[in-house]
Image (tube, rainbow, N blue to C red):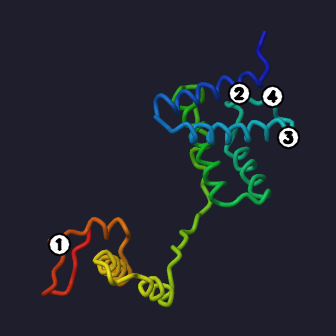
Amino acid sequence: MTRPTTYYWEDLLEGYRSYLKLEKSVAVPTVDAYNSDVSKFIRYLEATGREGLTAADVTADLLREFITEISKLGIGPRTQARLISGIKSFFKYLFLENILTLNPAELLESPKIGRKLPEVLTVGEIDKIIGAIDLSHPQGQRNKAMLETLYSCGLRVSELVNLRISNLYFNEGFIKVT
């Protein structure tokens, strides 16, 4: 007697969960997110009358169909990319474990995600911050120098706090930032 397909997918998910935790050393929230992504795909199979399909029955076309349906729901590109990453990882696991002879997710492409430019302060906002510093204390002088260096050189805070006096070249008019 064969077990219902639902148990079949649950067994695969349990193995995948162990693989992510033990072999890939993935953080628990990532394991949960990837399992959730695969569960969404399984629910999609059920909702479209394909609950009897096994992992070996899944094709690249079926996965693309699922992704198309997900994108129609208005899910953002970053979430779609993470979902696709979870699906790809799951099918890669099935392939590595010899559960599948072919990986249907191998050629799936994630949506292009544009890089977001950082928010920056205006010159007026920087002037207000520097103007609010109490220069009557030595710490005020230090803070003003730090803020002016930070913004005039376009440094990250981590770069500023790791500056050493040996990286300051006053005669040459530059600083060395690593």
Task: Tell me the quarter of the picture where residue 15 sits.
Answer: top right
Task: Tell me the quarter of the picture where residue 68 sits.
Answer: bottom right
Is 24 displayed left or right of 4 in the figure?
Answer: left
Q: Which structural element holds mark 2?
A: helix
Disc 4 to disc 3: CB gap under 8 Å: no
Structural distance between the alpha carbons of marks 2 and 3: 16 Å
Task: Tell me the kind of residue under disc 4.
Answer: Gly
- In depth, the one of 38 and 177 nearer the eye is 177
**Disc 2: which residue:** 9
Say above or below: 72 vs 90. Answer: below
Task: Tell me the kind of residue under disc 1.
Answer: Ile
Disc 2 to disc 4: CB gap under 8 Å: no
Structural distance between the alpha carbons of marks 3 and 1: 66 Å
Q: Residue at x 58, y 35 (%)?
A: 102
**Disc 3: which residue:** 48
- N-terminal of the two: label 2 or label 3? 2
**Disc 1: which residue:** 165
Structural distance between the alpha carbons of marks 2 and 1: 61 Å
Is 163 displayed left or right of 34 in the figure?
Answer: left
Of the two numbered discs 2 and 4 in the rendering, the one whose residue sits closer to the viewer: 2
Say above or below: 78 vs 44. Answer: below
Task: Tell me the kind of residue under disc 2.
Answer: Trp
Task: Tell me the kind of residue under disc 3.
Answer: Thr
Q: Which structural element holds mark 3?
A: loop
**Disc 4: which residue:** 52
Q: Residue at x 78, y 52 (%)?
A: 69
- N-terminal of the two: label 3 or label 1? 3
Is 60 displayed left or right of 69 in the figure?
Answer: left
Q: Picture coordinates of residue 75 (x, y %)? A: 73, 57
Q: Residues within 10 Å of mark 2 (few under 14, many from 20)?
A: some
Q: Residue at x 38, y 70 (%)?
A: 156
Q: Which structural element holds mark 4?
A: loop
